[in-house]
Image (cartoon, grey):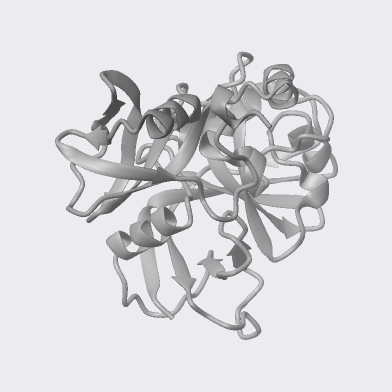
Amino acid sequence: MPTCHLDNRALFTLEGPEAEHFLQNVITTDLAKLGSGECRPGALLTPQGKILFDFLISRAGDEAFRIECRADIAADLVKRLTLYKLRAKAQISSPEQSVISVSWESDSGSSYSDSTVIDRRFPETITVYRYYGDAPAQDAGVEDLDRLRIAHAVAESGSDYELGDAFPHDVLFDQNGGVGLRKGCYVGQEVVSRMHHRGTARRRLLIAQADADLPAAGTELRAGGKPLGALGSVSGNQALAIARIDRVKDAMDAGNPITAGETEVTLAIPAWATFTFPASDGDAG
């Protein structure tokens, strides 16, 4: 059971009789589907539907929620939530930088405490635990966790996309429970809903693979002289990439190699995702 300790994350809580109602009307996650003992991805969007803050959210009691995010954005996220809170009966704690631990390849969480949750960003074929209290000793590094994220297409801001530059669909929040497509209104909901129901999401998180080590994160992907997207987290010959899937499909249909710098790559949709590459004219029928 590899375990990695993270010291660049922060935790804070939001609790009170109106905490759930308040959050449900502000963030992307559908809290009606958030069970105990699990965490799900979420975001606070701009009115234009782009991710302003990303985080993981879990229940910390009957009227309390635990929010985990990057330590460098925690204070700003608390400030923004406080602005939205107004007179709601809910209190937001000050963020505390914490050593959060992550383990995987474990068969059972029966021996874990109430502060241990399953990370639902990962498919059901693998169980990933996050510890907000005592945790097993560290025997893996951040690079091992990055390999796991890449293998299962789990994106994080700062590593794979910049805040203010991505829609929830770009990073597969519509696929992994990060956005509630059937819940009521929240900040940016109209744009996200329109994008989903009209099928206009074209930038998607994909898994990149090559025969040689890939260049650094941020390297542009190109095919036939056109830009397709850019690499995110890189581990050896595998990486995450956010790319225009219509242009990727055109390149594949035309037999044009897709490159990251000088390295040829293949781009694949994560096995657990439900979207596909768009059909081209030659695919009709």
Q: Give coordinates of residue 72: x percent, y percent.
A: 38, 38
Which residue lies most toward the left here? 262
Which residue lies most toward the top here? 48
The picture quadrant where one finds residue 253 is: top left
At 30% from the left edge and 30% from the top edge, which residue is drawn?
256
Q: Give coordinates of residue 95: x percent, y percent.
A: 51, 44
At 80% from the left edge and 30% from the top edge, which residue is drawn?
88
- Left or right? Give the position of 83 relative to 79: right
In this rendered view, identify the residue nearer to me: 14 or 213. 213
At 74% from the left edge and 51% from the top edge, which residue is drawn?
64
- Left or right? Give the position of 111 relative to 230: right
Q: Report whether residue 178 is seen.
A: no
The picture quadrant where one finds residue 38 is: bottom right
- Left or right? Give the position of 81 relative to 99: right
Q: Give coordinates of residue 85: x percent, y percent.
A: 72, 27
The picture quadrant where one finds residue 284 is: top right
At 77% from the left edge and 45% from the top edge, which residue is drawn?
31
Q: How many marks?
A: 0
Q: Give coordinates of residue 22: x percent, y percent.
A: 78, 33
As displayed, is residue 280 above or below residue 110? Answer: above
In this rendered view, identify the residue nearer to me: 208 or 258. 258
Q: Report whether residue 31 is seen.
A: yes
As displayed, is residue 281 above or below residue 179? Answer: above
In the picture, which quadrant includes the N terminus?
bottom left
As displayed, is residue 99 above or below residue 204? Answer: below
In this rendered view, identify the residue nearer to me: 265 or 157. 265
In the picture, which quadrant includes the C terminus?
top right
